[in-house]
Image (tube, helix red, strand yellow):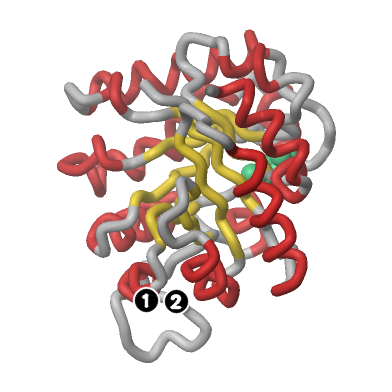
Amino acid sequence: MKKRIFGNWKMNGSLAANAALLDLLKQGLGHADCEIAVCAPAPYLVQLQSLLSGRAIAIGAQDVSAQASGAFTGEVSGAMLREFGVRYVLVGHSERRQYHAESDELVARKAQAALASGITPVVCVGETLAQREAGETEAVVRRQLSAVVQRNGHCLSEIVLAYEPVWAIGTGLTATPAQAQAVHAVLRAQLLAATTAAARIPILYGGSMNAANAAELLAQADIDGGLVGGASLKAADFLAIVACAG
Ligand code: PGA
């Protein structure tokens, strides 16, 4: 399948910085043979909609409410995101699980809300360092994915999955290609048990992916792309990763 390289800007950017970054990306992209998206903070989605219209860069959001509408102060619904051309939304990023106490069940409901709005949820799973050291990696990612499968089994083929070991996010410590592939294979097997479409569900790797390590990670059998944080804020770095994918 076509590789996917998705940038996660996290809580970074400004109108001016975003415009400059997107300009460089548009100039540098050429005919990349992979699917590209940038996941921006919600207030900038309107800017992305205007700057990326007709471009080969899809718009992503970083979170979505599990609710459709109503008295949920501060929340943003899938339908609202949809109005700004959003194609993808991250759900269950480890920073939201950690700092906002998002449970597996809430993440599954957010994925469901995205799907109901015609937005592809990018479901993030991953273990902490303590969990890896305790030999719990497989159990943790299987539990996290299982909640999403149980609630969204009927449209599971519409999701994107991202394996992001928490200890590798923003730390400069990347999982080795073999470590990442081993977990991706576990996730693929779990998807295979749940849907005949498992081979078509992209599983991205995230966690300190950069221009130097991307090619080897992306060459693994079950690694279908990358979810890139820090390196997505610098056009040259992001483009170099895209070049490894296309
Ligand atoms: P990082 O972040 O590339 O900066 O490690 C990845 C992510 O959190 O999605």
Vertical placement of residue 54 versus 80, above or below: above
Task: Please give the residue where the numbered disc 2 appears in the rendered image.
Answer: 76
Given residues 196 and 83, the one toward you in this image is: 83
Q: Residue at x 54, y 10 (%)?
A: 220
- The circle on residue 10 is none
Given residues 210 and 116, the one toward you in this image is: 210
Q: Is residue 126 visible?
A: no
Q: Residue at x 74, y 45 (%)?
A: 235
Vertical placement of residue 39 versus 56, above or below: below
Q: Residue at x 49, y 70 (%)?
A: 50
Q: How many marks?
A: 2
Given residues 184 and 229, the one toward you in this image is: 229
Mark 2 Cα-neighbour bin, 10 Å: few <14, some 14–19, many ≥20:
some
Residue 174, x across and y down, in percent: 75, 25
| 2 vs 1, front mark | 1
**Mark 1: amino acid:** Met
Residue 188 in which image quadrant: top left
Circles 2, 1 touching at the beta carbon (< 8 Å): yes
Residue 92, x across and y down, in percent: 51, 51
Secondary structure beneath dot 2 equals: loop
Mark 1 Cα-neighbour bin, 10 Å: few <14, some 14–19, many ≥20:
some
Vertical placement of residue 94 versus 181, above or below: below
Secondary structure beneath dot 1 equals: helix
Q: Is mark 1 within 8 Å of ligand 1?
A: no
Q: Residue at x 23, y 27 (%)?
A: 194
- The circle on residue 80 is 1
- On screen, residue 102 versus residue 233, left or right, reads left
Vertical placement of residue 36 versus 45, above or below: above
